[in-house]
């Protein structure tokens, strides 16, 4: 393995560290809004990785789409579902299992990666937007159009799903929202009746 | 060939029975029409079959005869032409029975046999149960006899049974009986014979006990059934023995094996076992054909309606035993012991039954004993000559049926069975008188009526065969002729002559009853001429018609023993004269009953009934053997049973407590508990509804798969 | 010239963190965020392998693929949030633990 650390390596490492840290914070944070914001950082570092790999267009697309649109969507979602603003326990009883699974998976992946690509180096070439466009609109024209179609459908579908039906009452208020209490969930899980909706607004 | 359709002959009466049962009551003649039409059709068909069979046999006999003639030359022809004493001596050793097998002309059997069968079911190991027909001369002859007499009886019954509330039932039974008898006759395997045998037995029971309201009638029916049942045991043993020897029920195969001298598997024929089987079969014949000592049921069976007596107990059912022996005749030929037994039994029967007829007051009982006696003649005749036996069967069927129907006519007019209530009926019932006279003369064997020819053939056959049994039969047969003549003459005088001793005014019977009498009188008188024992007629006569084997036919030429015939006829005439002398003026007291010990023994029927009922049934079995068996059953067998039961109970309790409750239930409860535990604690977690748990499981699985792929690749 | 392992390890890290988040977070929106993170790691992987396995007639396949994934991910977030909103409206809670109607 070539131990020489080139400058791109350093930048890559930096980006990786930042991204990894923020990712961890996403899942470990007790404040949901903080978690969303940490996600922003993580996604930005992903964009940075793209830059290191020479995919400029992709990096800016990532920023635009993810950071710009997806995070905003998520923040709106948090708002509309009256996510609690303050810190609270966010983990449920599946914690141990999740830890085990993810650690196992990570270990395995590391082993595999190092085994397969241990000493390899990537010859990064800068790819411009024009090249991407050429490929995209010529070779991948049909999938691209399908992609557009799919986005349209997803848009319409989201609207259909989330709109308010006739006769449906207003969204739950703060007082009705089941606040996620900071309590021990080691017992049996029981269903909370919530608002009696089953008879009312089933689509 | 017409005989291919012979199966119709039993089927027609059977279907008519069903039809009568179903719709008989609504018909104007209450079902009699169906029966009569069916039996007429059967008769016509039998006639056609007979024409075919007899014609074929005659041709075969002629061929064989011409084949022989070349060898033997004119010598034999000259001998045959002379009506001198012809003694066909075979072998010459005068043992018990001189009719030893052997010295038959060699060659093939060309007698007519038409056999068809369908396989009913395989019995395993390649054996099959079949239902089939076997038509030969004997069958054709029996067809004619049975259908003709049955027709006469059915026509007669429309008059005799008129007004009886169970008229339709009667005709149903008559048809069923006719069908059963025809089945018996047509059968080609012993199983079917057995079926027909039993069926006729049942019909006989039902018909004898037709007026079962009278205790006497039902008792007579039971007696008949039980006595013949006793013989049927022998029949079954015989059938089984034959099967075990030849591994087949088929009569043709059995006879072929016997002729070849082999048993199943190619072993040498075991004559001892064959004799045993044949004697067992003969036991069945003894029961069914009322031979000594199982004859006691026949006189009592007269309690049934007279047409029944005419049909069953004169012409058809009682001849079943003789038919059986005739059917298996080639087998009987191989067993001199069996033939000797047959001869002795028949001879005893004929003589002692004849004596019993002397002391009867009941007209039907006289005829019953006469039947028993004549059956004895037939049975004994078979021991010496096939043709003699079945010819006598044939002729007897006609004139005995005639006599019974005539007796029925008399009884119907006089309303009493007893001859002491009759008398002088010649004036009132001329048709009955004359036909009865013809029948009686035939029975007495007065030439040239039918009985003369057949009885003479019997005696001639016995005499020519020689041996102790042959001479015995000849002598007793001739003397029996005297006795027969005597009692029939007695009957004639007592019934038809002198003043009328009964009540009211008798009148001649209606046409329904008189016509069959007239019709039957014809064969009773004339049918003897089909079997004239002269060589000119022999090969185109009855002997040829019914031959079962051309070689037998060749070996048994016609015999006419003139001195013997003369003697027998003289004895008969002596009996007639003595009878006339005694009874011409109706005596005050019956002379037969004044003969001291002789009368006493006869009236008590040789104390046989007393023996059967009191000594054997009551004393020995009921009073001695019964209690003994009960003791064994109670003390010994029941103890064993109780002990077994108690043991089983104890075993059960132990098993229940320890094995069932502890071990098995414990295991079951443990398994159930284990299943419950697994479900509650383990598997329930997988269905918690916790999506993240599901996802976790999925990722775990992915991980494992990945590891597998990584390491495997 | 960078080490090939660095982006790949980074992607693996992101992926596993995302798995942890999916499996252990109670708020449904947070679960969605973790899913997004997993998708991001996938795109990194795609681009990296696209660079590693670059051939003459498969230029930029990795990047194009990654583009598609991004687009799909965005659509999925939209629909997913719509579903979460519906869930919230019906049950007044986005606690995943309470969405266990699939329990037997």
Image (tube, rainbow, N blue to C red):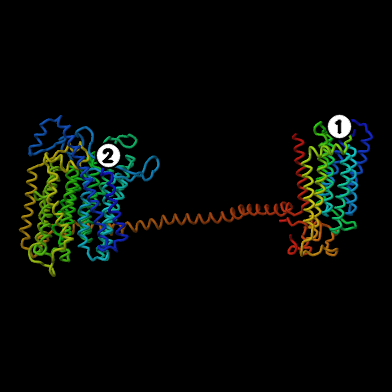
User: Is B670 in front, or is B610?
Assistant: B670
Q: Is residue B601 visible?
A: no
Please tell me whether mark 1 sits on a helix, a strand or a loop.
Answer: loop
Q: Residue at x 87, y 33 (%)?
A: A122
In the picture, the disc for residue A120 is 1
Q: Dot 2, how many residues are within 10 Å of its Cα: few (below 14), some (14-19), or many (20+)?
A: some
Residue C94 location, quadrant: bottom right
Q: Chain of mark 1?
A: A
User: x and y percent of residue B415 in the render?
Assistant: 17, 66
In the picture, the disc for residue B135 is none
User: Is A20 in front, or is B82?
Assistant: A20
Image quarter where the N terminus of chain B lies is: top left
* Total numbered circles: 2
User: x and y percent of residue A68 in the render?
Assistant: 88, 49
In the image, taking residue B545 as reference, residue C87 lies left or right, namely: right
Q: Is residue B691 above or below residue B420?
A: above
According to the picture, the residue beneath numbered tag 2 turns out to be B255
User: x and y percent of residue B239 in the render?
Assistant: 31, 45
Q: Chain of mark 2?
A: B
Q: Dot 1, how many residues are within 10 Å of its Cα: few (below 14), some (14-19), or many (20+)?
A: some
């Amino acid at each position: 393995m070539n131990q020489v650390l080139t400058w791109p390596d350093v930048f890559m490492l930096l980006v990786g560290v930042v991204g990894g840290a923020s990712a961890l914070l996403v899942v470990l944070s007790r404040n949901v809004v903080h978690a969303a914001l940490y996600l922003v950082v993580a996604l930005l570092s992903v964009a940075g990785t793209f830059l290191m790999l020479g995919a400029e267009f992709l990096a800016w697309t990532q920023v635009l789409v993810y950071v710009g649109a997806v995070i905003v969507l998520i923040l709106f979602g948090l708002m509309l579902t009256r996510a609690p603003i303050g810190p609270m326990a966010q983990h449920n009883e599946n914690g141990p299992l999740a830890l085990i699974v993810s650690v196992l998976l990570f270990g395995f992946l590391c082993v595999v990666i190092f085994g397969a690509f241990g000493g390899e180096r990537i010859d990064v070439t800068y790819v411009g937007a024009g090249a991407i466009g050429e490929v995209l609109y010529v070779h991948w024209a049909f999938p691209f159009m399908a992609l557009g179609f799919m986005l349209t459908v997803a848009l319409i579908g989201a609207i259909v799903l989330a709109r308010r039906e006739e006769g449906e009452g207003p969204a739950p208020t703060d007082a009705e929202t089941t606040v996620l209490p900071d309590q021990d969930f080691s017992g049996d899980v029981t269903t909370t009746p919530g608002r009696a909706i089953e008879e009312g607004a089933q689509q | 060939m017409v005989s291919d359709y012979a199966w119709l002959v039993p089927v027609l009466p059977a279907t008519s029975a069903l039809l009568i049962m179903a719709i008989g009551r609504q018909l104007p003649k209450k079902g009699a029409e169906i029966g009569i039409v069916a039996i007429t059709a059967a008769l016509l068909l039998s006639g056609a079959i007979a024409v075919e069979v007899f014609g074929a046999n005659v041709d075969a006999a002629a061929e064989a005869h011409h084949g022989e003639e070349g060898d033997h030359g004119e010598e034999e022809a000259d001998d045959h032409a002379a009506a001198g004493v012809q003694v066909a001596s075979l072998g010459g050793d005068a043992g018990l029975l001189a009719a030893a097998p052997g010295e038959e002309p060699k060659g093939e059997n060309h007698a007519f046999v038409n056999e068809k069968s369908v396989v009913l079911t395989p019995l395993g190991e390649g054996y099959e149960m079949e239902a089939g027909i076997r038509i030969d001369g004997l069958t054709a002859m029996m067809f004619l006899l049975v259908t003709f007499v049955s027709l006469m009886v059915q026509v007669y019954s429309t008059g005799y049974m008129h007004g009886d509330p169970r008229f339709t039932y009667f005709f149903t039974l008559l048809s069923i009986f006719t069908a059963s008898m025809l089945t018996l006759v047509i059968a080609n395997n012993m199983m079917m014979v057995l079926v027909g045998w039993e069926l006729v037995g049942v019909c006989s029971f039902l018909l004898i006990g037709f007026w079962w309201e009278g205790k006497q009638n039902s008792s007579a029916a039971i007696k008949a059934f039980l006595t013949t049942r006793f013989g049927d045991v022998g029949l079954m043993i015989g059938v089984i023995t034959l099967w075990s020897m030849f591994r087949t029920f088929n009569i043709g195969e059995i006879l072929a094996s016997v002729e070849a001298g082999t048993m199943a598997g190619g072993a040498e024929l075991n004559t001892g076992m064959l004799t045993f089987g044949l004697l067992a079969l003969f036991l069945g014949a003894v029961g069914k054909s009322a031979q000594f000592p199982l004859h006691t049921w026949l006189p009592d069976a007269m309690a049934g309606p007279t047409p029944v007596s005419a049909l069953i107990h004169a012409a058809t059912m009682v001849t079943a035993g003789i038919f059986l022996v005739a059917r298996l005749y080639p087998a009987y030929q191989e067993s001199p012991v069996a033939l000797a037994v047959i001869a002795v039994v028949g001879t005893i029967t004929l003589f002692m039954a004849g004596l019993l007829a002397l002391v009867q007051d009941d007209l039907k009982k006289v005829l019953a004993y006469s039947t028993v006696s004549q059956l004895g003649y037939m049975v004994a005749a078979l021991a010496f000559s096939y043709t003699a036996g079945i010819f006598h069967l044939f002729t007897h069927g006609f004139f005995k049926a005639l006599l019974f129907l005539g007796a029925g006519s008399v009884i119907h007019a006089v309303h009493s069975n007893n001859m002491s209530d009759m008398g002088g009926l010649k004036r009132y019932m001329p048709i009955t008188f004359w036909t009865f006279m013809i029948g009686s003369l035939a029975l007495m064997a007065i030439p040239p009526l039918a009985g003369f020819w057949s009885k003479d053939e019997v005696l001639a056959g016995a005499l020519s065969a020689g041996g102790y049994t042959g001479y015995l039969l000849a002598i007793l047969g001739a003397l029996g002729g005297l006795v027969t003549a005597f009692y029939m003459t007695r009957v004639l005088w007592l019934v038809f002559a002198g003043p009328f001793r009964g009540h009211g005014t008798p009148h001649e019977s209606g046409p329904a009853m008189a016509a069959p009498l007239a019709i039957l009188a014809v064969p009773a008188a004339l049918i003897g001429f089909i079997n004239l024992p002269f060589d000119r007629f022999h090969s185109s006569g009855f002997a040829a018609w019914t031959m079962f084997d051309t070689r037998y036919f060749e070996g048994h030429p016609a015999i006419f023993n003139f001195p013997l015939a003369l003697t027998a006829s003289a004895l008969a005439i002596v009996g007639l004269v003595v009878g006339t002398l005694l009874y011409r003026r109706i005596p005050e007291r019956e002379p037969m009953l004044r003969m001291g010990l002789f009368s006493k023994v006869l009236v008590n029927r040789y104390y046989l009934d007393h023996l059967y009922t009191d000594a054997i049934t009551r004393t020995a079995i009921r009073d001695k053997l019964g209690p003994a068996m009960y003791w064994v059953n109670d003390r010994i067998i029941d103890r064993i049973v109780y002990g077994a039961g108690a043991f089983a109970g104890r075993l059960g309790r132990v098993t229940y407590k320890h094995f069932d409750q502890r071990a098995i239930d414990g295991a079951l409860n443990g398994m159930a508990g284990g299943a419950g535990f697994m479900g509650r604690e383990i598997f329930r977690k997988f269905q918690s509804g916790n999506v993240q748990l599901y996802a976790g499981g999925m990722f775990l699985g992915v991980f494992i798969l990945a590891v597998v792929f990584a390491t495997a690749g | 010239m960078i080490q090939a392992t660095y982006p790949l390890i980074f992607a693996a890290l992101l992926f596993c963190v995302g798995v942890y988040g999916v499996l252990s977070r109670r708020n449904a929106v947070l679960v969605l965020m973790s899913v997004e993170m997993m998708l991001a790691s996938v795109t990194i992987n795609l681009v990296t392998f696209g660079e590693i396995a670059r051939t003459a007639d498969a230029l930029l396949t990795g990047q194009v693929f990654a583009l598609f994934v991004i687009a799909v991910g965005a659509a999925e977030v939209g629909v997913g949030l719509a579903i979460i909103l519906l869930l919230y409206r019906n049950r007044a809670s986005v606690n995943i633990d309470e969405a266990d109607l699939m329990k037997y």
